[in-house]
Amino acid sequence: MRKHTHTQDRYTRDAAVRRLERVNRWLLAGSVALTGALAEVAAHAFPGRTLASAQARTTSGTRSHRDSHRASSARPLRAPSQPPQAAPQPASSTPAQEAPPEQESAPASEPARGSSPARGSSPAQEAPPAQEAPPEQESAPASEPAQESSPVISGGS
Amino acid sequence: MQGLAQPSHELGCASWRALGTTVVLRVTDIAALQLARACVEHELQAVEDACSRFRSDSELARVNDAGGRAVRVSPLFAEALELALRAAELTGGDVDPTLGRALELAGYDLSFALVEDSTRTVSPITLRARAGWRTVALDTRAGTVRVPRGIHLDLGASAKAWAADRAAHGAAASAGCGALVSIGGDIATCGQAPPRGWLVHVTDDHRSDASAPGQTIALLCGGLATSSTTVRRWRRGRHTMHHVIDPRSGEPADTPWRTVSVAAASCAEANIASTAALVRGARANAWLSELGLPARLVDRAGRAQHVGAWPAAPAPPTAAAELCA
């Protein structure tokens, strides 16, 4: 009777040890998986930085969204070092080469879509869009000097 | 000192067609004009080979037709796409390079000369092409690009301005003088400007002349870009379309502005800001002001608003002033 009890205790102990082994294995596997997952999260959350310049960084390596965010944070849109100036006025200009002066907008003239005026802006009234001109043809001979009084046109394209 | 060539200080000017639009080149030394033009033509040809949406042999077409597979691209194309993705990020997605499909659905699936053709058979449409610039995978190390199936890139918004920057730098370097390059009205400068700056007339349409309503300014450095909904308009069924697409709707942007001009350190940056301003609508002037970018916004009624350091409209001409630069 006593021997039977002893054998049963041993079986119980062995079963408990096996259960512990299984639990340990699962714990080990889980911790490895969790470590990997945390490493992945950390890699995305805190990407490493390089000593190379921003220009070099953009040409080497895969671009991730966070990388691009970092790049753009470092280099937002930049203003010109010197803002545009009012054009010098001609001594005697011909009407064809002179932009019509803008007129102060009438108070009753509302924008088409209730848009907000600019802060510190100076509204001016402008005529409706001009009729589209035909595309420019090939230029005059290159040796010909530019007409300095004719500005380059900047408009939608 | 004899034998040294002295700059003529006479502006040289050339104009021709490229990238589907008008190119204007000006240099501060007329003797260097041919050299500068050759450099500009070379740069623009390279950009067209890489980024044209209307050429089946361009790198862009290969990427768009890859059906979601990675495509090896040139460093030039990768740089153009890098800029376009940066534009999307800087503008919160208002400027998006993945709007190619939306443009095609809107009817802008051919070069614009053909889109304008009123005899083309068109049908009523419903536009629902959502942007997805975050889905673009650019691996600059491997030199590959992958866009998901169904997404078509369009670099037109930024690539022309970027090309102007490249061309202006190349022209100034090769010619050894100041250079201005305008591509469809987006202007880049490099090197020493003429004594009184580069004269630029900002207006709705780059094909206009200086008599068109607008404002003439002197550009001293950097770039200037103008975006407008009054050009590249076409009819699709009963709808009037334009080429500035709102990524959130996939349709032509419904904006209170008809034309926005922005000055920035480069033409590419100016173009990013002017295009985004059209899409942002009423929030645009506050955004531009926050960025410190000089800008001129013209609303649908024709009222111009100046932001930041944009110069005031000129006073009536005086006899003492001289225009020549």
Image (cartoon, rainbow, N blue to C red):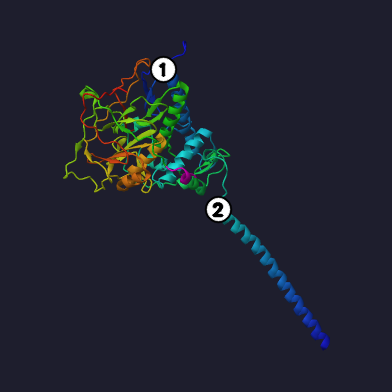
Question: Residue B50 appears at what percent x and percent y?
Answer: 48, 32
Numbered circle sitting on residue B7? 1
Q: Nearer the viewer, residue B319 or A41?
A: B319
Note whether B322 is above or below B264 in the view shown: above
Quadrant hosting residue B302? top left
Q: In the rendered view, does B186 fall on the left or right side of A59?
A: left
Whether labels 1 and 2 belong to a single chain: the reply is no
Is residue B64 something one can see in this rendering? Answer: no
Quadrant hosting residue B11? top left
Q: Mark 1, chain letter?
A: B
Residue for badge 2: A46
Quadrant in which the N terminus of chain A is drawn: bottom right
Q: Nearer the viewer, residue B139 or A155?
A: A155
Amino acid tagged 2: Phe
Q: Residues within 10 Å of mark 1 (few under 14, many from 20)?
A: few
Q: Nearer the viewer, residue B47 or B65?
A: B47
Numbered circle sitting on residue B158? none
Front label number (1 vs 2): 1
Q: Secondary structure at mark 1?
A: loop
Question: Residue B175 magenta-drawn?
Answer: no
Question: Residue B6 appears at what percent x and percent y?
Answer: 42, 15
Magenta segment: A71-76
Question: Residue B296 appears at what percent x and percent y?
Answer: 30, 38
Is residue B211 something one can see in this rendering? Answer: yes
Q: Residue furthest top?
A: B2
Q: Residues within 10 Å of mark 2 (few under 14, many from 20)?
A: few
Question: Residue B244 appears at what percent x and percent y?
Answer: 34, 40
Amino acid tagged 1: Pro
Note whether B236 is above or below A91 in the view shown: below
Q: State yes or no: discs 1 and 2 in contact (Cβ < 8 Å).
A: no
Q: Residue at x 60, y 56 (%)?
A: A39
